[in-house]
Amino acid sequence: MTPKNYLYEMIRSELTWAVGDEHVQTNDADKLGHSIDYYWVPECWHDRGEKPTPPDFVVHPGNAQEVAEVLKIANTHKIPVIPWGGGSGSQGGALPIYGGIVLDMKRMNKVLAIDPVSMTVTVEVGINTQHLEWEVEKAGYSTMHFPASIACATLGGFIAHRGTGVLSTKYGKIEDMIMSLEVVTPTGEIINTLPVPRHASGPALTELYLGSEGTLGVVTKAVMKIHPIPEARKFHAFLFKTMHDAMVAGSKIMTSRLRPCVIRLYDETETAKLIKRVLGIDRKGAYLVFGFDGPEKIVDLELEEACKICRALDHEDLGTEAGQNWWDHRYKFFYPPFMFHVPQAFGTLDTVATFANIEKVYWAMKNVVQDNFPQATFIGHFSHWYDWGCMLYARFIIDEPPKDPNEAVALYNRIWDMAIRAAIKEGGVINEHHGVGLKLGRIMRDLYGPAFKVLESIKKTLDPNNIMNPGKMGLPGKGE
Amino acid sequence: MHIKNHLDAINACRFCFMCRHLDPVGNVTFREADTPRGRALICDRMRMDAANLKNADFIETLYRSALSAANRFHCVSHYDETGLVLEARKDIVEAGLAPERVTALAKALEKASFAVKGKGSVLYFGEKPELYPGCKVITGKDAGKALEVLGFADASKAVFDKFAKAVEASKCKTLVVAEPSAYDFLKDKLAGVKVVHCAEYVLAAGVKAGRARKAVYLESDFLKNYCGNPSAPRDLLKKAGYALLPFGTNSEESYAVGEGAVVYDELNPALCEQLCKRVYSLSGTKKTLFITASATVRDTLKKYNPKFEIITLEEAVALLQA
């Protein structure tokens, strides 16, 4: 859209009537910040002097009614609306690839109520999740949602792409934490999903919006579970000769139905690289750490049982201190210079599979990356563990990608494509907790098969003008 | 360009979101530009193409920063994003592109003059000379910090030279400084003169415990985030009889309403009022005494709510000693 033309000014005026003049930005500084998220491609483009597509307008709504007004304006003019939380998504899900309106939700950041009887918090989803945790802690509770991006992202961002935190093994992913949602539909109606997540009153609408990445409406409010602060939280770490041995230990802990709050297993390469660099543990092998929380007596008992499982295998016991040290530095991995950064090319090829398949998935991805892209290093850890399997947080890193941005991006996309397709072939899925976004949309149709038509039909029915985040998740782009 | 001296911060911060929750301005404007990432992206664009230095939106954003350094304090590697913004401001000023209100403010600050009065071997620089009976007093306003923060390096040095000359003439070898911004500015600059913050000086001189009173101590951007978080202010208040209450949602956020930018209220009054409103709203309805190390912070918080009960460290100690 050309700024300063008649239509542009008309839309700008309408937006200011909806949310107030001071909450509509069209200046270069704001547009720049919203043209780049945590997706490697816009970072690379910026680094090479290219200019990623900016939005035409950045709008900060103050309540659901204002969101509804903005969506009605967008429908009238048939322009895209891209919900934006913290902007720290790694899949390009919040990028305004066609310009349009970026709906920055951060102004909707109020904690509305804490229910100590049912242990829930009602909150506007534009709240930064670290701020939410602080507010909840002040009342004597915790959300138990501790992702590495806790300080970067909003609750709405986690809802949009089914995010997860470090303690997911006990407290669940965001979809397990959410009770109900308030949503503004693409045509501007404000709706609420049922107040409880377990029922037999038809399909779960809450689930429809969890992971919809802003393509089916705008989530404005959530009721979320909260938890008591545990009396104790204790950790233990072991080193195994191979990743396979460590995987056997981890899966036995889970299938014995112990309830760790966290398990994390680093493959040999990541142990040698990152565990050494961040935690200073300089050993060959696969580093496994786990923790339990709750009443101290139960924690001690469960921790001992988990240690027994590990000690029955070929192991080196690194003790509680090495486990606690990991917990204390769990976010350090994500700060510069510990995190990978442009001009390096890097991607988190995260996926999830059953215990029966997860190692096959790991090797399929690793082999495809190493065989086809010798310039890439492949590392991985297993982060979020369930009764039936776990998540693989695999990464590729290229220290010196091609200088030409188009060549670099083509190489990057090729690695993603081959690695994720290899994972799917072995029982993995596109992603576990970072979402699909722009990056992986092209693979959705293959992943879902004929079922993708169901998603397309829902989208078409709910969003007849395709204004909501077009071109993401493999759904049609603008004008398609 | 001066910003090239902070390439490490540009490279580290331009794609990093890890401290965004602590930017006091971003937390009230909710704008991506008002975060260390947003500002580093702007500086990167300026680095890549000097024509971007002329972008009025970019310039405004850089002068909107409250320079609290809470982000730097939080960062595990302490990348100096506020230092980067200061370098960018220098580039803007040297290119003759500073906004009109910034230039006008700088012109007023350049007129600073200093004089030394009284007797003693210790020199005091602050607003409460009556609390330091055995000391000489140096009068005058900002010693060059405000100009430095605005990006006027040469003018800052000229004002500092006037201040240094006055200190030298006093023949004192110890300078007690009350305002944290002045302490931060002067502590390593005066050859042969020991610069101490008033909290440290009064604590060493000894205070008697007064009657017990509860209060909130609002941390200073300069003392906490720039000067290594000395314990002296809190130790002094506790010794004087204050029971310090927790405030806000955590111990990381800055509630210093633009202290780091020294002349923030003069520069961005509407935004400064928003920062103040955040403090008022967090303080709730219960009447609480607030204590700050900075007279500027006190005056700013009083300006937008005259009923807000806030005093400086020096006033707090005097209150309980009376």
Image: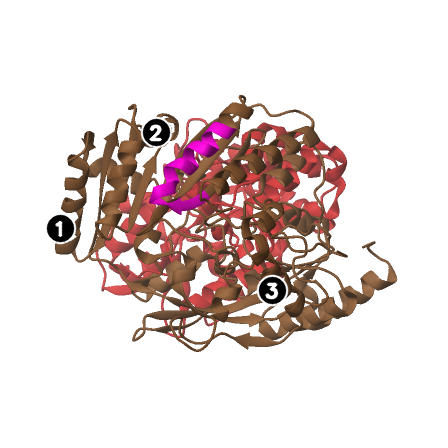
Chain colours: A brown, B red
Left or right: where does residue B251 sit relative to residue A151? left
Q: Is residue A345 left or right of residue B191?
A: right
Q: Does the magenta portion include A355?
A: yes
Magenta stretch contains residue A190: no
For discs 3 and 2, the disc positioned in front in the rendered view: 3
Q: Is residue A175 above or below residue A76?
A: above
Q: Mark 3 to mark 2: distance in Å?
A: 41 Å
- Specify whether residue A365 is in view: yes
What x and y, as percent, mark residue B199? 34, 47
Residue A48 to residue B213: above or below? above
The tag on residue A301 is: 1
User: How crowded is the residue under tag 2: few (<14 C-alpha within 10 Å), some, or many (20+)?
Assistant: many
> Which residues fall within the magenta stretch?
A351-368
* Label 1 close to label 3 by CB (< 8 Å): no
The residue lying toward the viewer, choosing from A197 and A255, is A255
Label 1 near label 2: C-beta < 8 Å? no
The disc label shown at residue A216, or none: 3
Q: Do the dots labelled 3 and 2 sit on one chain?
A: yes
Q: Nearer the viewer, residue A268 or A449?
A: A449
Tell me if B240 is positioned left or right of A364 in this view.
left
Discs 2 and 1 lie in a common subunit: yes
- Give the tally of numbered discs: 3
- Type of amino acid at the residue the image marks with label 1: Leu
Query: In the rendered structure, the residue with mark 3 lies on which chain?
Result: A
- Pointers 1 and 3 within a single chain: yes
> Which residue is at 47% across, 45% downward?
B18
Q: Which mark is residue A271?
A: 2
